[in-house]
Image (cartoon, rainbow, N blue to C red):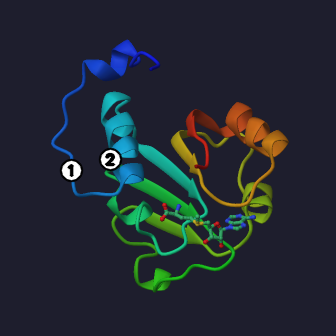
């Protein structure tokens, strides 16, 4: 079994053990890294996105499967209904996010490019 990264083993959380694994994992990282900005590529029903405890959250999906417009613009949430290529083409290239969860259809070379340009920590798709 791979050893636990030391910086994460020092962190205690109050994460709900009934939450999705993705939510628990992301919230642990967000707390450990004091994340203020979060980007999720591929949001689907928002089951992960809506439970991530980061002040400013951006979600991108060409076809959200929930009432996304009722969340957009509230509680630090910005939602963009478009493919990730369109989203990245629309933002300032200097924009960075503390934590990015890539869980949509994306190729490895693009994941590497996104990682290098826009983020501090990447959680790749399952
Ligand atoms: C596995 S689901 C995401 C699940 C979600 N992250 C969660 O944890 O509940 C994959 C999603 O990726 C989206 N998707 C597919 N191609 C995409 C693209 N080019 N850019 C952004 N999202 C994409 C699909 O519409 C789908 O909703």
Which is nearer the eye, 95 or 68?
68
Image position of 32 (left or right of 38): left
Q: Are marks 1 and 2 in contact (CB under 8 Å)?
A: yes
Q: Residue at x 21, y 50 (%)?
A: 17
Image position of 87 (left or right of 73): right
Q: Residue at x 48, y 48 (%)?
A: 38
Instruction: State the image coordinates of residue 117 (x, y, percent, origin top left).
Output: 72, 35
Which is nearer the eye, 73 or 20?
20
Q: Which residue corresponds to mark 2?
A: 24
Image region (quadrant) for ligand 1: bottom right
Q: Residue at x 66, y 60 (%)?
A: 104
Q: Residue furthest front?
A: 1
| Other residues around mark 2 within 10 Å, as few (<14) / some (14–19) / many (≥20) | many
On screen, residue 86 above or below 26: below
Ligand 1 within 8 Å, label 1 CB: no
Question: In terms of secondary structure, where does tag 1 sit?
Answer: loop
Question: In terms of secondary structure, where does tag 2 sit?
Answer: helix
The earlier-in-sequence mark between 1 and 2 is: 1
| Other residues around mark 1 within 10 Å, as few (<14) / some (14–19) / many (≥20) | few
Q: Is residue 55 visible?
A: no
Ligand 1 within 8 Å, label 2 CB: no
Q: Is residue 46 visible?
A: yes
Which is nearer the eye, 31 or 92?
31
Q: Which residue corresponds to mark 1?
A: 17
Instruction: State the image coordinates of residue 57 (x, y, percent, origin top left).
Output: 45, 56
On screen, residue 10 above or below 40: above
């Amino acid at each position: 079994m791979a050893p636990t990264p030391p910086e994460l083993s020092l962190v205690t959380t109050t994460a709900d053990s009934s939450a999705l694994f993705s939510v628990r994992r992301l919230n642990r990282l967000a707390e450990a890294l004091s994340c203020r900005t979060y980007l999720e590529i591929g949001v689907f029903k928002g089951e992960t996105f809506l439970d991530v405890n980061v002040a400013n959250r951006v979600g991108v999906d060409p076809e959200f499967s929930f009432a996304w417009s009722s969340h957009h613009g509230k509680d630090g949430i910005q939602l963009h209904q478009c493919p990730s290529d369109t989203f990245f083409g629309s933002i300032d290239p200097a924009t960075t996010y503390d934590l990015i969860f890539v869980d949509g259809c994306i190729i490895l070379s693009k994941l590497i490019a996104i990682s290098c340009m826009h983020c501090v920590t990447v959680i790749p798709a399952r």
